[in-house]
Image: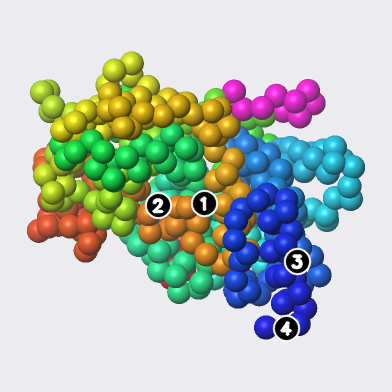
Amino acid sequence: MSKSNFSRRKFISASILSTVGLGAIPTLSFGNTNIAADTAKIRLGFIGVGRQAMGLLSNMMKNPMVDVVAGADVYKIKLDRFKERVAKHYADEKRQAPALKVYADYKELLANPEVDAVVIASPDHWHAMMAIDACHASKDIYLEKPLTFTIHEGQELVKAVRSNGTVLAVGSMQRSAANFQHAARMVQKGMLGKVKQVLVNVGTPPHPKPYDLPSQPVPAGLDWKTWTGPLPDIHYNEELDPPISLNPEQNEKVWGAWRWYKETGGGLMTDWGAHMIDIAQWGLGMDRNGPVEVIPATDSKPLTYNYANGIEMLITSFDEGRQGVKFLGEKGFIKVSRSQYDTDVQACERTFSKDELAFGDHHVDFIDSVIKRKDPVVPVEIGHSSCTVCTIGNIAHEVGRPLKWDPIAQEFENDWEANSKLHYTYQHGYSLKT
C-alpha cells in the first residue's frame, strides 16, 4: 500500500469515529483502488434517480463521509431534479459542492474513475446487469431490494461480488431497526420455545398480475427503449415511471407501478416480501438457506412454505392487517412490523424510542463497510436467499402445484418446468457480464 493511501485510511478511520461513531478502528486494507488518496470522502454515484433514490440521496448526503459526484438515469427531468437536490444540499451546508456529472447511460458513470461507489435504485429488471457491471468496474454498491429479478441473476451477482472483492449492501433496511433486530434475536435465542409457525403479511394480492395498463405516448426526455432493456417489448404508461415537474416542483404522486406486473416486477411478493420474508428468514436462522417445499394458495390455505425442521411459514394477513411478521412458538408470540413490536412473552418485552425504529443507520453501515472493507448488515448472499424465497412463491403460484426446493443447490427437485422459470431470455441483445 502506498504511503498516501495509508495516510488516507488513517484519516478516514479517525474521521468516521468522530463524526458518526461507528465503533472500532477499521483495518488498513483498502480494496477499492479507485478511491483517491487526497480526499477523505467516499465519492458516490446514483444509478436511477426516481422517487426511491431521492430518499436514499437525502440519507446518504447526511453522512459527512460522503460526496455525491454523479448520477445516471434514462429520464432527463429526473436527472435535472437530482442536480437541483444535490446543489441545494451543498448550498444549505454553505460549502463548495464537488463537481457533479450526470449521464443518460449508467455505463459512462461506471467508467468515471472519480466515482468510488454507487447506489442502484433502478427497476428490478435492471438490478443484476447494473450491479454486475459495477463489480467489474471496481465500484462498491448499495443495491435496492429485491436483489434481482430472477434467481439465476442472483446467483451470478453473488459470484461477481465475491470474485471482484466488491462491498455490496442490500437495501433491506429493516435489519437496521431495533425492533426487528430484537424480534429476530429473541426468536433465535429460543425465548418463544420451539417455533411452530410464522405468519408473514406482504399485502394483498401478493402475486403479480399481467400487464394491462393502456398505451400512452412516451414523454419527452424519457428513453423508453433503454428503460425496458432486456424485457420483451412493452408499451409505455406513466404509472410505470411516474412523471414529475420542476417549475413548479411536483414529485411523483405514486410509486412506480412496474412492481405490480408480471412482465416488469414480482408483485407484493418481491416488493414487500423482500422486507418481511427477509425478517422471517432471519429470525428462523435461515439466512443463506431456505424452505424445502412451497405450496401455492388454495381456497382453504394461503401460500405455504415448509422448512426441513418442520416450521411452516404462511403468507397471509393477520391481526390488524399491516405488513409484518408474527412468530408463533410454544411459549407465545412475537409480532413485529414497522413502528411496532408486540409479544405475550414477558422475557421478550421491550419498548423502543422513535430513533430506534428509524432506518438511517442502514445507510451509514454501507459507507462504514466501504471504508473498512467488510460485509455490511445485509450482504449479497442474504439478499439473494431472501429474494429467492419470494420468487419461488411466485413460481409455485404460476405453475399451480406444490414444488420441492433444494435451498443449497438452488433448484427445484426433478421439475423441468419450474426450473425453466429461474430466469428468462433477455431480449434486444442484452446479457449478463459474468
The residue at which mark 3 appears reads as: 11
Q: Are marks 2 and 1 in contact (CB under 8 Å)?
A: yes
| Quadrant housing the C terminus | bottom left
Q: Earlier in the sequence, mark 1 or mark 3?
A: 3
Residue 2: numbered disc: 4
Q: Is residue 310 above or below residue 373?
A: above
Q: Nearer the viewer, residue 31 or 83?
A: 31
Q: Amino acid at mark 2?
A: Gly
Report the label total.
4
Q: Earlier in the sequence, mark 2 or mark 4?
A: 4
Q: Magenta stretch: give its range.
A: 245-253
| Quadrant housing the N terminus | bottom right
**Residue 373, horizontal then vertical, whole percent:** 56, 67
**For residue 315, which quarter of the picture?**
top left
Q: Are marks 1 and 3 in contact (CB under 8 Å)?
A: no
The residue at which mark 2 appears reads as: 383
